[in-house]
Image (spheres, rainbow, N blue to C red):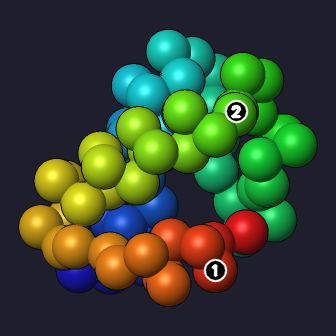
Amino acid sequence: MTREEVFEKLTEIFRDVFDDEDIELTDATTADDIDDWDSLEQINLVVACEKKFNVKFDMKEIQALK
């Protein structure tokens, strides 16, 4: 999977989780750039990414996310 394909999939996930079709992800995107990003949405985002990419994050990895 290319970097561009990963960004496309992540953009789909972010748009779905935050119900905002205007979200455009970049390397510089942070939680401050997205309205309604809170701890609950963070969990929803992690779960959606795990499902989409067929991976499982452990708690240390999740806590290290910025």
Q: Secondary structure at mark 2?
A: loop
Residue positioned most to the right? 32
In the picture provided, is 46 more to the left or to the right than 49? right
Taking depth in this image into account, of 21 and 35 the one nearest to the observer is: 35
Look at label 2 and name its amino acid: Trp
In the picture provided, is 2 more to the left or to the right than 52? right
Give the residue drawn at x 23%, y 80%: 1
Above or below for 19 versus 27: above
Taking depth in this image into account, of 52 and 3 the one nearest to the observer is: 52
Residue 34 location in percent, x, y?
Answer: 76, 33
Above or below for 14 versus 63: above
Give the residue drawn at x 30%, y 49%: 47
Above or below for 47 versus 13: below
Residue hosting label 1: 64
Taking depth in this image into account, of 35 and 61 the one nearest to the observer is: 61
Quarter holding the C terminus?
bottom right
Residue 64 location in percent, x, y?
Answer: 64, 80
Residue positioned most to the front? 59
Q: Residues within 10 Å of mark 2 (few under 14, many from 20)?
A: some
Residue 2 location in percent, x, y?
Answer: 32, 80
Q: CA distance from mark 1 to mark 2?
A: 17 Å
| Circle nearer the N terminus (1, 2) | 2
Residue hosting label 2: 37
Determine which quarter of the picture holds residue 23. Answer: top right
Give the residue drawn at x 32%, y 75%: 57
Taking depth in this image into account, of 37 and 58 the one nearest to the observer is: 58
Residue positioned most to the left? 54
Q: Secondary structure at mark 1?
A: helix
In the picture provided, is 54 more to the left or to the right than 19? left
Look at label 1 and name its amino acid: Ala
Residue 53 location in percent, x, y?
Answer: 20, 65
